[in-house]
Amino acid sequence: MSDHQPDLQRWAVSPTVSLVRLDGTWLWEDPARGAHRRLRTMPSWLGPLLARLLAGPALPWQSLTSAAEDCGVPADRTEGCLNSLVTAGLLVSGGTTGPDRDTAALRDRQWALVSPPADYTRPSTVDEDITLMWRQAAAEVPPPAYHRFGDGPRVALPHPVLDAPGHPLDALGHLLYLTHGVLEDAAIGPLPRTRRVPPSHGAAHPFDLTVTTRTVLEEVSTYGYDPSEHALVPLADEVPETGTPAAEPDLLPEADVLTIHLVAERVQWRYRSSTAYPTIFLDLGHLVETLYTTAAHLGWQVTDLPSRGAPLFRPRAETGTVLTRLALRHRPVAGGER
């Protein structure tokens, strides 16, 4: 007797599973589970059974057993074979719904799993990639390479090389420019991109920065960092979550708070599948590690801020989801504080 409550459940083929044959080997993959694996054997009865189930409605367990036997499964092995298909995710309870098997995200991921790595040293590969992006851009405008905060007032920050030292915002300007500043605008076909100090997969740089500091004014204020103009943009319409900017009295005003916001569309527009998310966290590591390295050079201490419920400020819609927040503490150095 099966443990699958045959009188209560009906079973069907998972709507997100695919069986793909590549170089003589069968691959099982399921984007909904984020997994794939090679099948050591491909029994002769599996194809006919899946085809039969795909052609009809979900079946109770007893009918599923009969169907398996009709397709060639030995009677004494039917229960074990069907249970293995349930464990693998090929069979799911009837009524379980999933995305259409032909949606772009699922299809892109299937090809990504079974396709050999693209060789971008070949000009033809680059041309094909750009042609594909132009087709995508005709249907959906690509996102900008960085957030534009509008034409409001800005607080210019000193450049780490072009400006003389001694400016009150010298250390903050160095930190932001060497961590996130735009060195040069670029493009990949129709897709706007930038070159910056930290590496980024596909030059996506899918983050925006905001800074909460008392350094600019005499009161704690939050600013957006404009990486193209290397300037701080006052976010005048920010509302403190607790009614007071001193939501973390142990940090402010002794420390500045840098918030990293995610703009996933900069990655998803091009890669369009769940494989975009490992790329996002890879880029987050690049950004944070560069920030730590720069801060250490400037004599600053960086500390991760654990989540304490509500953020210091409610994130603005245009700055994106808050991924992480860091406290920046100034350390005394020879000759005074930087």
Image (cartoon, rainbow, N blue to C red):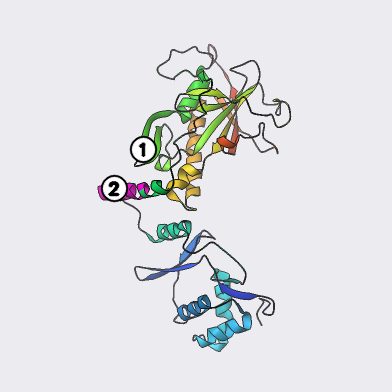
The image position of residue 149, as x and y in percent, is: 52, 29
Can see residue 17? yes
Which one is in front, 259 or 237?
Answer: 237
Residue on which the image places disc 2? 127
Q: Quick one: SS at disc 1?
A: strand
Local packing at callout 1 (Cα closer than 10 Å; few below 14, some 14-19, many 20+) is: few
**As displayed, is residue 107 above or below residue 331?**
below
Question: Which residue shows up at 63% across the image and 34% down it?
Answer: 305
The span picked out in magenta is 117-134
- Outermost residue toward the right? 243
Q: Amino acid at mark 1?
A: Ala
**As displayed, is residue 253 above or below residue 323?**
above
Q: CA distance from mark 1 to mark 2?
A: 14 Å
Local packing at callout 2 (Cα closer than 10 Å; few below 14, some 14-19, many 20+) is: few
Question: Which residue shows up at 45% across the image and 78% down it?
Answer: 47
Residue on which the image places disc 1? 187
Is 133 inside the magenta-drawn segment? Answer: yes
Question: Which residue shows up at 50% across the image and 17% down it?
Answer: 170
